[in-house]
Image (cartoon, rainbow, N blue to C red):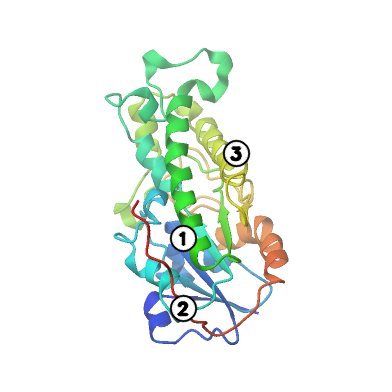
């Protein structure tokens, strides 16, 4: 049994055999993308997934992509084509890796933004100490961010329902990352969280607790906000599936390649601990099959 990752051109050129493999489409951020460039060095959660059967994943995930943008046909015309054109596979599931880059953008927002438009509080806004790590977080800002993310999921759901009513949407949380100055690609990308925490004046001793709370809040959002609005929606609870990096480290540490990405082995560990059993339970009912003609109705204006 194998999970094979394909690109858009593979789909267009007919190089993915959906007669022998279950067709799955994927979109999102670097947790789903890095494995394609190349998988044996960089790793990704999508590459590490084991569905218990042959699955062909056509993957549109790329680094830096935000969840809020994923449903936009102007930004992701190839993904939109794969979801709407006649002759596309009868997708059994949509894998979504998203929300992390949206959160990072809000972490980076400075004091000049209204407190309801950022997720970090600055020193004059901190709550009493008995709030724990939450004293450094803006609940109003988190609510605003969640409304933005919920809208993206509702638009993905509408795209799914117009064309593939039986398709499942499967997403994941993230895992407990350690905010630290550990960039990727020799400093070309990142770090992502630590600079924002530092700029907000949050004590470094509190960074890990704050990041952990944000991941927990994200799970609650997916499980209790999105899942109650969307049918056929599964959340892979990936929290606690890997060993966190050591605070203050600046490179590969334990299961983490950098501040926010796991090593290839770390993704495999996480998938085995938190994803594969759920995926296999769902995949038992999925069928293989060649493409079936569909004609999607015109896209409603956003």
Residue 175 pos. (x, y %): 56, 47
Instruction: State which tag comes first along the sequence, 3 or 2.
Output: 2
Read off the residue under disc 3. Answer: 220
Q: Nearer the viewer, residue 230 or 205?
A: 230
Label 1 neighbourhood size at 10 Å, few (<14), some (14-19), many (20+)?
A: many
Q: Which is in the foreground here, disc 1 or disc 3?
A: 1
Task: Determine if residue 55 is in view.
Answer: yes
Q: What residue is drawn where x is 41% and y is 82%?
A: 10
Q: Is residue 160 above or below residue 197?
A: below
- Left or right relative to 90: residue 251: left
- Left or right relative to 95: residue 188: left
- Whole-Å distance between the Cαs marked 3 and 2? 34 Å
Q: Nearer the viewer, residue 46 or 116?
A: 116
Read off the residue under disc 2. Answer: 88
Read off the residue under disc 1. Answer: 159
Q: What residue is drawn where x is 39% and y is 70%?
A: 37
Q: Check if mark 1's residue and mark 2's residue have beta carbons within 8 Å.
A: no
- Whole-Å distance between the Cαs marked 1 and 2? 14 Å
Q: Is residue 88 above or below residue 123?
A: below
Q: Quarter-wise, where is residue 164 in the image?
A: bottom right
Q: What residue is drawn where x is 62% and y is 40%?
A: 224
Residue 88 pos. (x, y %): 46, 78
- Determine the secondary structure under disc 3: helix
Q: Is residue 237 above or below residue 143?
A: below
Classify the position of the N terminus by image quarter: bottom right
Q: Quarter-wise, where is residue 212 in the image?
A: top right
Task: Determine if residue 137 is in view.
Answer: no
Instruction: State which tag comes first along the sequence, 1 or 2.
Output: 2
Label 2 neighbourhood size at 10 Å, few (<14), some (14-19), many (20+)?
A: some
């Amino acid at each position: 049994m194998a999970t094979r990752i394909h690109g858009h051109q593979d789909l267009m050129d007919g190089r993915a055999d959906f007669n022998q493999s279950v067709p799955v489409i994927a979109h999102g951020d670097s947790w789903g993308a890095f494995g394609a460039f190349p998988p044996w060095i960089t790793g990704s959660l999508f590459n590490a997934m084991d569905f218990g059967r042959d699955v062909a994943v056509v993957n549109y995930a790329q680094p830096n992509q935000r969840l809020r943008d994923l449903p936009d046909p102007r930004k992701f015309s190839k993904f939109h084509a794969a979801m709407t054109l006649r002759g596309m596979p009868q997708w059994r599931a949509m894998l979504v890796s998203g929300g992390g880059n949206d959160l990072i953008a809000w972490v980076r927002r400075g004091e000049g933004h209204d407190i309801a438009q950022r997720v970090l509080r600055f020193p004059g806004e901190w709550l009493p100490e008995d709030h724990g790590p939450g004293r450094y977080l803006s609940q109003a800002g988190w609510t605003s961010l969640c409304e933005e993310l919920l809208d993206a999921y509702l638009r993905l759901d509408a795209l799914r329902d117009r064309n593939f009513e039986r398709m499942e949407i499967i997403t994941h949380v993230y895992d407990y990352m350690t905010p630290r100055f550990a960039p990727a690609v020799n400093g070309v990308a990142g770090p992502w969280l630590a600079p924002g925490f530092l700029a907000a004046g949050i004590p470094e001793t509190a960074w890990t607790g704050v990041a952990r709370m944000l991941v927990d809040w994200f799970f609650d959002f997916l499980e209790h906000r999105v899942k109650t609005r969307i049918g056929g929606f599964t959340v892979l609870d990936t929290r606690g599936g890997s060993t966190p990096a050591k605070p203050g480290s600046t490179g590969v540490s334990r299961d983490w390649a950098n501040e926010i990405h796991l090593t290839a082995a770390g993704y495999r560990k996480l998938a085995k601990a938190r994803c594969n059993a759920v995926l296999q339970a769902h995949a038992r009912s999925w069928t293989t099959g060649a493409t079936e003609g569909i004609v999607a109705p015109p896209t409603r204006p956003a």
